[in-house]
Image: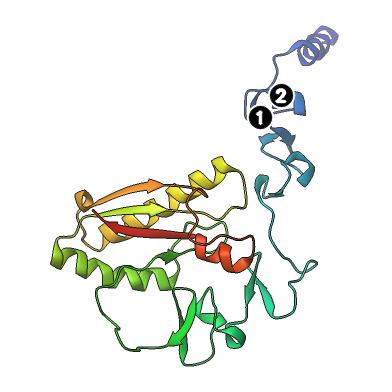
């Protein structure tokens, strides 16, 4: 019996290392540039594992939020999903409908009366996105629902151009802009627009609509533009 235990102990000492993504130590994950977290190789365990300007969230390195409960925004703005949003009731700018006074909605970054002149017209406006998001908001969905009818009625062909603000690495922003463009195309095709009528491209942070390093500029640059071709 003692030989069985000895053999088991020897196997434990000389056995092969865990197969990725399993791990016993950071050394098992170093080839992928990752760290060992509770027996699994992950991108990060703490903020120290991420590049400057990024933080560790759910073991992934993501752009550092502009604000938080412990890092509030300056007067006149409020923290929403990690970014400082200007109170639309004060200067008319907005990111979502929640930033606008009652009876108004957010259109192209400005608070405007609901159902105002030109509602339902065939307009091609940029589709805005929240910080670090590629998922369409309710405003974007509504705008695309109206646009889908125009595309089908007029047999338009559009180039769906994704963009990101300047925060984060160039590679991350390029991927994010591609995801935003793909999200818009997918929503339009779900509404019956032919796949051949839409082509997508991501520009990352390289074609800002507005120059500047503030929330107003960042909000304007987090977008997808639909260009007739």
Quick one: SS at disc 1?
A: loop
**In x, y percent, where is residue 9?**
82, 14
Would you name the residue on which mark 2 appears? 28
Most foreground residue, 123 or 180: 123
Residue drawn at (25%, 78%) of the image: 121
Q: Mark 1 packing: few (<14 Cα in 10 Å), some, or many (20+)?
A: some
Ranked by sequence position, the earlier of labels 1 and 2 is 1
Residue 135 vs residue 67: left or right? left
**In x, y percent, where is residue 168?**
62, 48
Image marks 1 and 2: residues in contact by CB distance under 8 Å: yes
Residue 129: give its label: none
Q: Is residue 46 above or below residue 192?
A: above
Q: Quadrant of residue 42?
A: top right
Residue closest to the far front: 211
Quarter of the image with the N terminus in it: top right
Most foreground residue, 112 or 12: 112
**In x, y percent, where is residue 210?**
52, 62
Residue 22: give its label: 1
Residue closest to the far bottom: 103
Residue drawn at (75%, 74%) of the image: 74
Q: Mark 2 packing: few (<14 Cα in 10 Å), some, or many (20+)?
A: many
The CA distance from mark 1 to mark 2 is 8 Å
Residue drawn at (51%, 54%) of the image: 164
Residue drawn at (54%, 47%) of the image: 173
Residue closest to the far top: 3
Q: How is the image coloured?
A: rainbow
């Amino acid at each position: 019996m003692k030989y069985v235990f000895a053999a088991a102990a020897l196997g434990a000492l000389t056995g092969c290392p865990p197969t990725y993504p399993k791990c016993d130590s950071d050394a098992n994950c170093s080839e992928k540039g990752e760290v060992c977290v509770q027996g699994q190789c992950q991108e990060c365990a703490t903020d120290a594992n991420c590049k400057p300007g990024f933080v560790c969230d759910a073991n992934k390195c993501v752009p550092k939020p502009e604000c938080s409960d412990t890092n509030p925004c300056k007067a006149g703005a409020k923290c929403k999903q990690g970014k400082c949003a200007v109170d639309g009731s004060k200067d008319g700018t907005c990111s979502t409908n929640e930033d606008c006074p009652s009876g108004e909605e957010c259109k192209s970054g400005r608070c405007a009366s609901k159902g105002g002149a030109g509602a339902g017209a065939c307009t091609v406006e940029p589709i805005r996105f929240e910080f670090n998001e590629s998922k369409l908001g309710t405003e974007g969905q509504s705008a695309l629902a109206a646009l889908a009818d125009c595309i089908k009625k007029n047999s338009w062909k559009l180039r769906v151009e994704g963009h990101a603000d300047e925060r984060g690495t160039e590679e991350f922003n390029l991927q994010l802009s591609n995801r935003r463009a793909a999200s818009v195309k997918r929503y339009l095709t779900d509404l019956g627009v032919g796949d051949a009528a839409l082509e997508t491209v991501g520009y990352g942070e390289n074609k800002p609509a507005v120059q500047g390093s503030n929330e107003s500029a960042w909000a304007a640059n987090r977008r997808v533009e639909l260009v007739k071709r």
